[in-house]
Image (cartoon, helix red, strand yellow):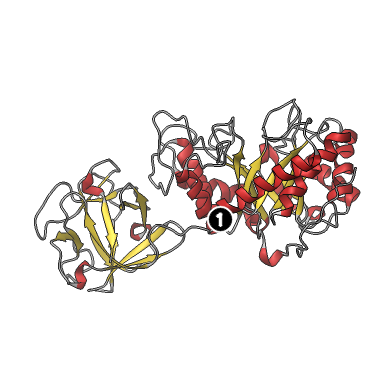
Amino acid sequence: MAASAAWLSVTTVSAASLPDGLYGMNWAANTIATTHWPDGLSASQTYAQQYAAGQVVGNAVKAAGGLTVRMPIDSTLSTGNNWYLYAGAINGVGSTGCKVIITYWLPSGSTVSDVNAWYAIWDVVNASFGTNHPTVYFEPVNEPTYSTDAALANLYAGFLTRYHPPNWKCILAGNNVETICTGIGADTRLNNQYLGLHMYSWFASEPYSGGGASWQGYYNKCASCVGSYAWRTVITETGVQTDGRSPSVPFWQQWRFGMDPDQAAFSGTLAWARDNNVGVIAYSGVNYANLYHWFNSIFVEVNTQANDMFRWAWKKKNSPVVAGTYRAQNRGDSEYLDNLGSTTAGAPVAQYASSSSNNQKWNFIQEDSVWYRLQNVGVTSEYLDGFGYTANGSALNQYTSSGSLNQRWALEVTDSGYYRLINKQTGQCVDTGGLTGNGVGVQQWGPGSSYNQQWKIAP
C-alpha cells in the first residue's frame, strides 16, 4: 500500500553540499532472521500509533542534534498491513523534518541470495517513497560481502536501472561488511549516489583491534577505505558500547596512542568524519535493549560523553579549546608553561610562576579537528616542539616553524577542565616530571594519570 502523509518540500541534495543533513541515528532492533520492527513498534498497533511513535523518535533525534533516522526494511515489514503500519512510522519521522534512510537488513549471510525477493521488497518501498520523496533515502543492502567489488556493483547497477532513482537518492554500501568503498566508488554506473561505510573496532578486516589501539590508525583506515570518495561517503554505522563497561572508559576527546580498541575506533572515525565533512549515523541510537544505544526508553541520554563525540563530528559541538591565545597551568604544581624569553631554536621550555609576561602566552593554532601548534607570543618565531624524543624524562623544546609532526599537539580531555598535550610524532605528553621551581625545564612522558601532565588551558 502507498503511504499517505505530507512530507516537507526539500530540494534534493547536490554534490556541492554533500552530505548535508545525513547525520543522526539508527532506529532498529538490529536482530537477524526475525522481524525488524524498530523498538517501540509492533504489528498490533494502528497507523496513527506508529506515526506518533515516528514523531517522537524524529523529535528526539533532532533535539539531540541529528537530522536523519536510519530504519530497516525486510520481507515482513514490507508486506500487507505491516507495510501500511510501518509507512506510518516512516511518515511520522519525516513530519518532524528529519530525513529517513531505509536500509535492507539481510536475513542471513552477507549476499542477496534471492534477487527477485529483494526486488519485491524494494518495489513496495519505491512505490511509496521513490522519486517524489527527496528526504527518504534508499540503502539497498546493509553490510554486504561479495567475492568481488564487481559482483556487488552489478547488484547496485541492476537496482538503479530498475528504479531510476534521482541523483543522491541512494547510499550504496561498500563491500566487505561495508568497509571498502573504493571499488563501488570507481564504477561509473554508480555515479551520483552516496557510498556507505561502517567502522567498528571488531571487524576482522581492520587493523589495531588489539591492546594498545591507535585512534590515528582508525583515522587512516577510514581514509584508505574510501580513497578519493570521501566527498560522497556517509558513515551509516559506527559506535561503541556506552554503558555496562567494566571498567568504564571515557569517550570525549581521547587522543592517546595506546587506547581501548573501542575508544580508538570511535575517536579516529569521528575525527576523520569531521575533517572530511562526512555524515555519521550512530549505531544504535534508538535501541533500548542494546548496549550501544543513545537513549533509554524515556529518551534520556545514556552516555553524554559518547553522544557529544557524535555531536562534535556533526559540527554541532566545538572542540574543547578553540584557536586562540592561552596560558597553560600545570595541575600538579600550579606553574605555567614558559619559554623564559629565549629566542634560540632548540632552547628548552620551562615552567614559571604566574606572570603577565608574553613568555607564558601561547597561540593555539588549530591545524584540523585534533591537532594544534603552540606558538609563543613573546618570541613569535618559536613553536613548542617535541624534537622526536620518545624516552620518558626527555626535554621539551622550542623551534622555528616547520612542517614537522614534532610541532603538532593534541589536547586530550582528562577531567575538571584539564588536558594532556600529546605529541603527534611520539605520543609523549608535556609533563613537569614532578619537578618544581621557577625556570625548571619541562619534560615529556608517556600518558598517565599524574597531575604533572595535566594542564589548564585558559587566557
Residue 453 percent across, percent down from the top left: 25, 48
Please tell me which residue is depicted at 74% across the width and 27% down the height of the picture. 109
Task: Report if residue 280 is visible in the image.
Answer: no
User: Alpha-carbon neighbours of circle 1 within 10 Å: few (<14), some, or many (≥20)?
Assistant: many
* Kind of residue indicated by mark 1: Trp
Say which residue appears at 74% left-offset and 48% top-offset.
Answer: 92
The residue nearer to you, when weighing 424 against 120, is 120
Viewer-nearest residue: 387 or 63? 63
Q: Is residue 8 above or below residue 254?
A: below
| Residue 255 locus on image (x, y percent) | 40, 48
Image point (55%, 45%), residue name:
221
Position of residue 374 in the picture relative to residue 237 (left or right): left
Residue 357 to residue 226: above or below: below
Label 1: state its secondary structure: loop
Regarding residue 65, the answer to whether it shows in the image is yes
Looking at the image, residue 420 lies above or below residue 379: above
Left or right of 146, for residue 265: left
Extreme-left residue of the structure = 437
Q: Which residue is mark 1?
A: 314
Residue 316: x percent and y percent? Answer: 52, 58
Q: The C terminus lies in which quarter of the figure?
A: bottom left
Q: Position of residue 265 (x, y in %)?
A: 50, 41
Location of residue 104 by image quarter: top right
**Quadrant in the rendering for residue 387:** bottom left
Name the quadrant of the N terminus.
top right
